[in-house]
Image (cartoon, rainbow, N blue to C red):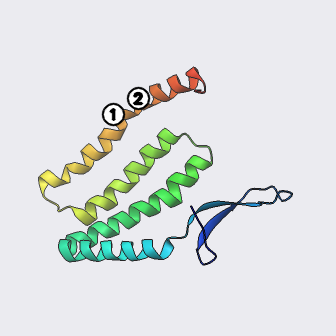
Amino acid sequence: MILVSSDNVSLWPTGEHQTQQPFAFVDFERSSALLVLLLVFAALVAFLGGWHGVRALVGLGISLVIVVEFLEPSILDGNPPLAVALVGSVAAVPEDRTRTCSSRGAVSNAPLGTRAAPAARAPAAARAAARDRAAGPRA
């Protein structure tokens, strides 16, 4: 890979100021291209999906806030990831349902299944995590 002086790149400090390379190349800066792609995607969803598409985008945004503001900090604080994931999934269900579903009977049963599925898988996930911890690090 050849870099030129006009390339916008992301760098990561190596922490070694005594060496000739105090920074490491991470990637090319693609923020503007990704922002354009995001806006085109959102416009297409809103155009093709109408109000359902707009409500789905709002639900996606709220779910992203739940992940960034609750799930990630909670796991980084040392809370058990399985419990955090269960609480986060239960928190995301009501807002998703109110924005993307109607109030008909068949659809209103969907949140029950969405809440029950992670809880049903939780014991198996806990056993697998315990088995992995007991096995120790992998080579």
Residue 17: x %, y % from top left: 83, 59
Q: Is residue 39 above or below residue 74?
A: below
Q: Nearest the camera: 48 or 51?
A: 48
Q: Marks 1/2: CA distance?
A: 7 Å
List the single residue furthest toward the front. 2
Q: Nearest the camera: 126 or 91?
A: 126
List the single residue furthest toward the right. 18
Residue 122: x %, y % from top left: 40, 34
Question: Is 87 left, or right, of 41 in this rendering?
Answer: right
Question: Is 114 left, or right, of 76 in this rendering?
Answer: left
Label 1: element kind: helix
Q: Is residue 118 above or below residue 95?
A: above
Label 1: few (<14), some (14–19) or many (≥20) C-alpha neighbours in 10 Å:
few
| Residue marked by disc 2 | 123
Q: Is residue 63 above or below residue 134?
A: below
* Res 107 label: none
Badges 1 and 2: C-beta atoms under 8 Å apart? yes
Q: Which residue lies at the image location 48% right of the left edge and 41% below the top edge?
A: 83
Label 2: few (<14), some (14–19) or many (≥20) C-alpha neighbours in 10 Å:
few
Q: Amino acid at mark 2?
A: Pro
Quadrant of the rendering where the N terminus is positioned: bottom right
Residue 19 picture quarter: bottom right
| Residue marked by disc 1 | 120
Residue 107: x %, y % from top left: 16, 54
Q: Amino acid at mark 1?
A: Ala
Label 2: element kind: helix
